[in-house]
Amino acid sequence: ITAHRPYACAMDLRGKTLFITGASRGIGKAIALRAARDGANVVVAAKTNEPHPKLPGTIHSAAEEIEKLGGKALPFVLDVRNETQIATAVAEAVKVFGGIDILVNNASAISLTGTEATSMKRYDLMHQVNIRGTFACSQACIPHLAKSSNPHILNLSPPLNMDAKWFAPHVAYTMAKYGMSMCVLGMAEELRSQKIAVNALWPRTIIATAAVQNLLGGDESIAGSRKPEIMADAAHVILTRSSTEKTGQFFIDDDVLRGAGVTDFEKYAMTPGGTLFPDLFL
């Protein structure tokens, strides 16, 4: 995380409680660490309890990093496909921190495969994690968000675009991610009267994560990526705004930061001056 505030910010996240799914690594962890610098409380809700041979980090290592930066962490083993686990995690978060102010639906499963190459097991995983998990976590958190002074739900999902080119190469994955975006569209209006903001955030370029390393071309893709910190800084801008200011929006990371006064984007590049690869759906 950058050691300075890269934009003007009237509010911070001190004392706020964030429930972040998939927060043990990647973008979810970066958002958690950015919040920790403000002194936030973070529920690290993810599946990785023990070290994984191919994936960096656990809920416990993420929690340690959060606390070193000045935040408070509650690591919790959570499979977002399991509503009983979700209910338990939310109840524990409320017990430990007194409430929930922000939900970040970051957990996601990906398979960039065509129809014949997508097993039904993989299809079910993407839909259960991406759409069902987002819906279930939102459902469980809403009663507590409604009690917050500045409640937000932020889904890591793309702008909705019905052009066939975004569906044809990987229709199962697109449907799963667009399902998260449809949650934004519907819940933003549904929850407007409760002053709960519901928005989406998506990257302009691919982001250097384990998924990119393992699924999208390895080192070459990483070289053309931006660091997860750009998503974390953009999320911070969104989550520190008044929840009555913007809802139902599909934000792009660098647009958010540009609007907040950021002019230096090279610091986010894995290869400064190199060619950046655009992300899917843009």
Image (cartoon, grey):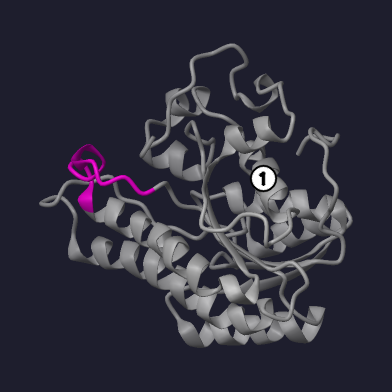
Estimate the x, y position of residue 61 in percent, counting from the top left.
71, 58
- For badge 1, the amino acid type reads Ala
Residue occupying image coordinates x 84% and y 52%: 11
In the visual, does 95 lie left or right of 30? right
Q: Residue at x 45, y 73 (%)?
A: 135
Q: Is residue 17 above or below residue 237?
A: below
Picture coordinates of residue 271 (x, y %)?
A: 59, 18
In the figure, is residue 262 to the left or right of 9? left
Q: Name the residue nearer the viewer: 193 or 233.
A: 193
Q: Position of residue 13 (x, y in %)?
A: 81, 58
Mark 1 residue crowding within 10 angstroms, few (<14) / some (14–19) / many (20+): many
Q: Is residue 79 above or below residue 26?
A: below
Nearest to the observer: residue 144 or residue 106 = 144
**Quadrant of the image for the N terminus?**
top right
Q: Which residue is mark 1?
A: 232
Magenta run includes residue 253: no
Name the chief secondary structure element in magenta. Answer: loop
Residue 40, by quadrant, is bottom right
Q: For this view, does 84 lie left or right of residue 5?
A: left
Q: Pinpoint residue 85: horizontal percent, then vertical percent.
A: 53, 83
Residue at the spot 37% in from the left edge and 31% down from the top edge = 217
Q: Which residues are magenta?
A: 160-171
